[in-house]
Image (spheres, coloured by chain):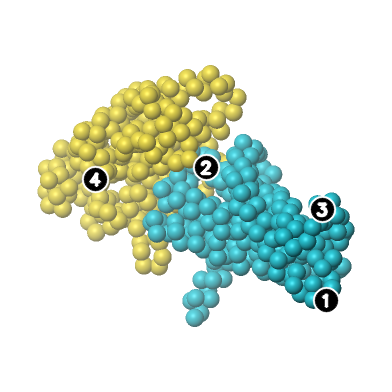
Chain colours: A cyan, B yellow
Amino acid sequence: MVVYLKNKFSDAGTATLFAARFFKEVFRPPLEIKEFLRQCYILGYKSLVLVGITAFIMGLVMTLQSRPTLVEFGAEAWLPGMVALSLVKEIAPVITAVICAGKIASAIGAELGSMKVTEQIDAMEVSAVNPYKYLVVTRVLATTLMIPLLVIFADAIGIFGSYISMNIHTDITLFRFLSKALGSIEFIDIIPATIKTFFFGFFIGMIGCYKGFTAANGTESVGRAANAAVVSASITIFVIDMIAVQITDLFL
Amino acid sequence: MQKSQESTQEDVVRTGKPIIEIKGLHKSFGKSNDILKGLDLTVNEGENLVVLGKSGSGKSVLIKCLVGLIRADQGEISVFGNNITTLDSNNLNAVRIRMGFLFQNAALYDSMTVRENLAFPLKRHQKDISDEDLDKTIRESLDSVGLEEAIDKMPSELSGGMRKRIGLARTLILKPEIMLYDEPTTGLDTITSREISELILAIQKKNKTTAIIITHDMACAKLTADRIVVLKEGVMEAEGTYESLENSEDEWIRSFFI
């Protein structure tokens, strides 16, 4: 038990040092702009379809399931606003982040894990290229920037899904739906929800990189790194969300 | 353990002044896993030194300590007069640029083409290089290993021997003064192994490099070695030319040459 706890604390210390190095390296030249843009394309643009489909279904299903209860209370007119508010404040950021934890953190964990096992990271280091700067900083920056954008995209698609769902039972124009949906959202709802997505992005990238970078030798560890990246990133997202909601509740 | 010196100072090829000096090198992984136990070794400028030893005798750890991939627990490693064990990352990188390392599996970057693999270190260390010069240097480097036609291929499209050659070309592109080869012929057929060994020799002659070659392949050792050292349980057990060690009185040493 003591050994187990010692190992866990040691691992937490190593992970903290690994993450802290990011802030030391991020502003130090050379800035790997080309690799950063490549990662934005791979991690952000290539996730659009997955995030779009998920968000559309989320908006559609939420509206369908909430409708009977609101109809019972004669409050069907509140449906667009309620769904939009739920999506923007909570559902879209968390679900998008969890989806990205599955897609992006595992991809980063597996890629860097495989590079570690096949000595590609060592090859970078012996050719006097900083592998942390090239591999970690670019990926973490890309996820930190792309996850908020994907969440905004998911908000829009989710609200559109809700509009489609509304039209199954009632006849409502897009303009009227949007004015009702967006009318219920204030800037004060959007800001904390958006700020937390930057943290989601940072931790998704960082956990994926850490698990990949610390993969042991052997091909088995590549799969383990990918799996550990998804599990750790998913739990971290919920913990960050809980902290963010508590902080928002204190101040707003 | 008694160290058997298989050859006199005169037998060993001394091609130049010492360029790598290792004194009392210790490295262990965990409490009871001592790999290197006070190794002393000198490599002279321009010589090809082959390191032999059983698996787990610390050969790969030795060359990884030399480039700072593994930090030594104790001892001194002097390369070009710099003590590797005490250098900060900037100074260590300055030494690393002057050294080349060919990994056992070539360690080509999977996501890049051969051209990008070769351009990767070059663009980072010669920032003002023009596209024309970059292309010319890449082609020259590929030509030196006889694989110019593979320039736009992905590593996954290459055979084991080709990967080794491309790995060598990528290492040579920075014109290193010291080459470190980690089992360069492992996993290759006899003919390809011989081609790689001949390439190592050609590189030494053309670029006047100093090399440490870790190998189990005695044909490679015979062809490339100016001097051979044999490691046993983390220390140097024997040292000499191929011929002197082949005729050693020690049966264990001779067993490598059968």
Q: Residue at x 20, y 50 (%)?
A: B4
Q: Quadrant of residue A193?
A: bottom right
Cβ atoms at labels 1 and 2 below 8 Å apart = no
Disc 1 crowd rating (10 Å Cα; few below 14, some 14-19, many 20+) is: few
Q: Is residue A79 left or right of residue B258?
A: right
Q: Position of residue B184 (x, y in %)?
A: 31, 39
Between the residue at mark 2 and the residue at mark 4, the CA separation in whole angstroms equals: 29 Å
Q: Chain of mark 4?
A: B
Amino acid type of the residue that numbered disc 4 sits on in the rendered structure: His
Give the mark, 2 or 4, whose residue is nearer the N terminus.
2
Q: Chain of mark 2?
A: B
- Label 4, secondary structure: give it: loop
Q: Position of residue B17 (x, y in %)?
A: 37, 32
Q: Residue at x 81, y 56 (%)?
A: A172
Between the residue at mark 4 and the residue at mark 1, the CA separation in whole angstroms equals: 81 Å
Mark 4 or mark 1, whichever is nearer to me: 1
Mark 2 or mark 4, whichever is nearer to me: 4
Between the residue at mark 3 and the residue at mark 1, the CA separation in whole angstroms equals: 23 Å
- Label 3, secondary structure: give it: loop
Q: Position of residue B224 (x, y in %)?
A: 25, 33
Mark 1 or mark 2, whichever is nearer to me: 1
Between the residue at mark 1 and the residue at mark 2, the CA separation in whole angstroms equals: 72 Å
Mark 3 or mark 2, whichever is nearer to me: 3
Q: Tell me the tag on residue A173.
A: 3
Amino acid type of the residue that numbered disc 2 sits on in the rendered structure: Leu
Asked whether residue B12 is in view, the answer is: no
Residue bearing mark 4? B216
Q: Quadrant of residue A133?
A: top right
Asked if badges 3 and 4 are on one and the same chain, I answer: no
Residue bearing mark 2? B92
